[in-house]
Image (cartoon, helix red, strand yellow):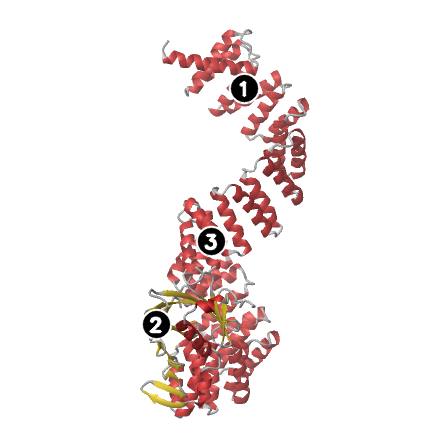
Amino acid sequence: MNKKTNKILIFTFIISVLLMQSGFSFGQNYEAYKVYLKALLEQKSGKSAAAKKDYEKAISLDTSAIIIYKDLTYLDWSIGNKDNAMELAQKIDAIDGENPDTTLFLAGFYLMTQTTDSAKAFWDKTLKLDPKNETALSSLALFYFNDNKFTESKKYWQEFLNLDPLSAIGNYQFGVVQEKLNMNAAALESYDKVIKERPDVLDSYVAKANIYEKMGKIAQAVKVYEQFYENYPDNSFILVYLGRVYYLTGDLDKAQEFLLKAKKILKDDFNTAFWLGMTYERTKQIENAMKEFEFILTFPSQKDNVTVLSKLGFYYAVSGKYSEAEKYLLRALKIEPNNSDLLNLTALNYMDAKKYDQSIEYFLKTIEVKPDLNDAHFYLGVAYDRKGDWQNAKKALKQTLEMFPNDERTMNYLGLVLANKGEDLPYAQSLLEKALTIDKNNGIFIDTLGWIYFKLGNLEAAEQALVYAANGTRQPSAYYHLGDVYAAENKNANAWVAYCLAYDATGDKEVKKKLDAVQKTLSNIELSDRMLFRASSHYFKLLSLKTGYKAQAGLVFASKSMYFNFNFVKGEGIEISLPIALMPDAKIFIKDSKIIFYPDIVKDSVSPEILDILQTAAQILNGSFIDSFKTAYIETKGGDMIYHLGEDTLVLNIKDSTIKEIVKGGLTIQVLENKPFYISKIPSKIKIISKKFNYSVILTASPFTVSDRRIEIPKK
């Protein structure tokens, strides 16, 4: 027997078993069976026309063979003979319509042909013939669910589960229906049953967690995913889900940890990239966020993702890369041309890029789409003003106030520009007075009102308002305006300080001219006193700072370089984390000239050299240290102002009042380099020389960032 004959016999045997199971009686008509078998083989080999011919021949030999009708029905439908297929279905119903197996077949056929009403009718008939038919029950449950008739769907799932209460599929679908009916507690119970029977089914955990998220119980959702992760840590998708819910709880470190794990496994998953990008955004790692969102756009299905495109447009805009921002924003607008938020963001990007005509064009489009968008009206006036079209700017700003009479931002802007131009000052004053009835302690508004007072010639009221504004806001404009007021009052020493504070924050050349002019009128004593104030201002303006200092060179306690984490929060003190090599989790706190070691044993392990530096640093970092030199002997040398107070010396750079050197308690501290941080200048490279211990060390700072946490000094 050859292999081909053997394969035919095997196939014939399988078909025979299937025919016996279907009720086909060979004895009744063996000839019909042979022709039917031939048709099956022809259909299997793709000979549809020959198969159809033999199916029809088999039916002519045995008109009661339902299985042949069924197969011919599907064949006719598949080759496009749809009318014939429908006629055959009707014949099947006429011949064997009281058999639940046949009614199920007909329901399935009509479902395939999208004749859903007929499909439902045959599922209903099946249940009349066989009330416990699970296939019909589940099919009707899904039918009603897809038709948004959730109460009916729930009824059939309940009947199904009465027959098979442990069915994972049944309980899961039952839970989905219960969710739709806002039966969240019941849905949670259904999902718990699935988890108990099939703890490996991720969908049930996801569904359960989603309910908790909808209820605002994010911590509960985290527990659900953690339960799955504990048992199936290798499931890559649970890493994404965990990362997402950790993000939602605000635990960004854990969110990033799990999403990075997921990314290593799911290298081509844009969902992972999205949540990782969102996490980077929240942690201010904007460049990393941009990489993730740009990666998402490489997927064909995501290239038109408006959310991602608009985020990238925003990132590039705030990064000052206006052309790149324009590219992404215009792509997004091609997809959603009437998206008012996108139109407004595009207009703002053009304004920042100083493309005022385009900016005005897009603000007008924004207003056309969303006439009640306050921002668009306000910034339209700003764009006209920056373009130099004052008449249209004034018109737009006044129209904004007509539409939004309590918009204090517009009141302030219009009042400020009127003051700068010396135009309609009483009206400008009324605008700011009204703005301050809405937000009475707003330092920016008080700054503008003080400037208006100055323009009106009321110097006393101007000084009072601007001192309050400057102290409250630290805004460069308030210092600048205050400088002009002091200069007009011939209070040149005070004017010098105000101009310095404005210039240090902005580097504005016009301010520098005024600063230099005032400085020439000051005596050496006045200048030295004011320089101390300016020097301390670099630090009292600082709210928080996080960095690290790398120590290099000849310290007795270390032959290699060491790194110290440095964290400062205003009002809370300084936290210094020592290298792990010295002692794990060891910390030193400095506050109000006091040094606190944690744990206490750290003090015993710190070398005398380090202790000497810390003690001196604690005194220097006290807020009153620089002020103590007000009674010092003063000398000028080159570009330096040198203060001598007993054995202590302070050297300031006359140009910007930054500290160049401090000599105190046997230590010489030289600031080799400063770096700007917000509106302050912070030492980034420091050299410390000790005569007492005969060493020198250079401390170099890593990049400065804002501290992201409080400093809590342990209580002893």
Q: Give coordinates of residue 222: x percent, y percent.
A: 56, 49
Q: Residue at x 65, y 24 (%)?
A: 125
Q: Quadrant of the N terminus?
A: top left
Considering the numbered disc 1 on the image, is that residue within a helix, a strand or a loop?
A: helix
Q: Is residue 529 above or below residue 412?
A: below
Mark 3 vs mark 1, CA separation in Å? 56 Å
Badge 3 amino acid = Gln
| Image mark for residue 697 | 2
**Tag 1 near tag 2, CB within 8 Å:** no
Q: Nearer the viewer, residue 685 or 552?
A: 552
Q: Is residue 24 above or below residue 622?
A: above
Q: Give coordinates of residue 190: x percent, y percent.
A: 63, 39
Sequence order check, earlier mark of 3 and 1: 1
Q: Give coordinates of residue 86: x percent, y percent.
A: 55, 23
Tell me if residue 539 can be seen: yes
Q: Quadrant of the C terminus?
A: bottom right
Residue bearing mark 1: 70
Mark count: 3
Please identify the residue farthest to the front as the structure is shown: 604
Residue bearing mark 3: 256
Q: Nearer the viewer, residue 97 or 30?
A: 30
Q: Residues within 10 Å of mark 3 (few under 14, many from 20)?
A: many
Question: Taking 615 as reference, is 445 left or right?
Answer: right
Mark 3 vs mark 2, CA separation in Å? 37 Å
